[in-house]
Image (spheres, rainbow, N blue to C red):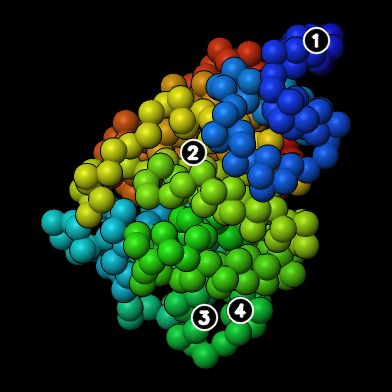
Amino acid sequence: MQRQEQADTLKILQKSLSKELFVISEKVKTGIPLSTSDGILLFEKGELGFLGILADVVRKRKNGDKAWFIRNFHIEPTNICVNRCNFCSFSHHFSASKWELSVDEILAKVDSQDESVREIHITGAVHPKRDIVYYGELIKKIKARRPKLHVKAYSAVELDYMIKKAGLDFITGLQYLKDCGLDSVPGGGAEIFDETIREKICGMKTCSADWLAIHRAAHILGLPSNATMLYGHLETFSHRVDHLERLRQLQNETGGFNAFIPLKFHRYNNEMKDVLEVPVIEDMRMYAISRVYLDNFPHMKAYWPALGRKMAQVSLSFGVDDMDGTINDSTRIYSLAGAEEQSPVMTVSGMKQLIEEAGRIPVERDSYYRPVL
């Protein structure tokens, strides 16, 4: 019944569309991938309500009215970083102090988590003195304590540094970490793929080609991953679509991405403080167009510590089907940049309520999007 109502709403809306937008809506309705020019046109001329309806078509096609979440927590081992990214508020370059957790301190954080927690997310700064053996041994020690805990660890930027430092290729380096217990790779460090913008905001960081190559290697080895985009700074609509297109092409090749996560730029405590943040309407447009364009991605995630829980709830009406997880107040990367969520923690009951209030069905999942019964 709901799907028929959705189709009727789209049909009524199509009567008022320009010819170009009508063609795009027909492509979305029939499951035909959009072109890059289609994507740019949606950013330039797509009104929010229209984009929400299109994104809803894709969301329902892939996930019905389910909205997923997981019991998880983060560990950020250090803020000491070899890179100096202009948008970063986390690294020691912009912090009042340097800090690095010892292995024992990290393991104590693991021990403090309830047994119901299913996933640990480890990512942070790129420490100049830590190597791939250190990070591999850390995973082994975590797995020795919690064998069933899913370890999603090390962004492509961290992996690039440690693997190259060891003199290994990406496949060999990732295979070593997989043998140590690595289960999947997070999506951080993608920022924006356009090389001219990347040079301006994070010129010291892993290049776009190597970010994609690392995720390709992970997928070849059976390690699923996520993908991100940092939006709302110096990029144009064309840069956003170019980023989405490169991700879609890799997904067509490997099928290894679980979810796409748009990440909003926050301007506080970093060198891009003069760049105004985009309004909420642009956030929702970004989610909706991403959902429509990335037709081969199974999930669209709202990382609520960056967006804020209320806006993450709203995003469920703009293509999002995954609300990430409980987090357990274990990350500071976005709170340091001025995000609304200064103490990001959500209970399971709170997560379910947030989802239900948006008219969706909450489904607790594991790291592979299998429902937890």
Earlier sequence position, callout 4 versus callout 2: 4
Q: Secondary structure at mark 1?
A: helix
Towards the viewer: 18 or 326? 18
Q: Earlier in the sequence, mark 2 or mark 1?
A: 1
Which residue is rendered at x = 81% and y = 28% of the image? 26
Query: Mark 3 and mark 2: span between their CA atoms?
Result: 28 Å
- Asked whether the residues under the numbered discs 4 and 3 touch, taking CB atoms below 8 Å apart as contact, a structural biologist would say yes
State the SS at label 4.
Answer: helix
Three-letter amino acid code at disc 2? Tyr
- Up/down of 264 relative to 205, above or below: above
The percent coordinates of residue 66 (x first, y second) are: 70, 26
Residue beneath disc 2: 303
Decide if residue 118 is on the left or right side of residue 235: right
The amino acid pointed to by label 3 is Ile
Residue tagged 1? 8
* Quadrant for the C terminus in the image: top right
Residue sitting at the far front: 19
Q: Quadrant of residue 54?
A: top right
Whether 197 is drawn above or below 176: the answer is above
Question: Mark 3 falls on what kind of element?
Answer: helix
**Distance (Cα) linking label 1 and label 4:** 49 Å
Q: Height in image: 265 above or below 326?
A: below
- From the top left corner, tell me how far across and down residue 16 is, in percent: 70, 13
Q: Is residue 252 above or below residue 308?
A: below
- Horizontal side, residue 224 vs residue 31: left or right: left
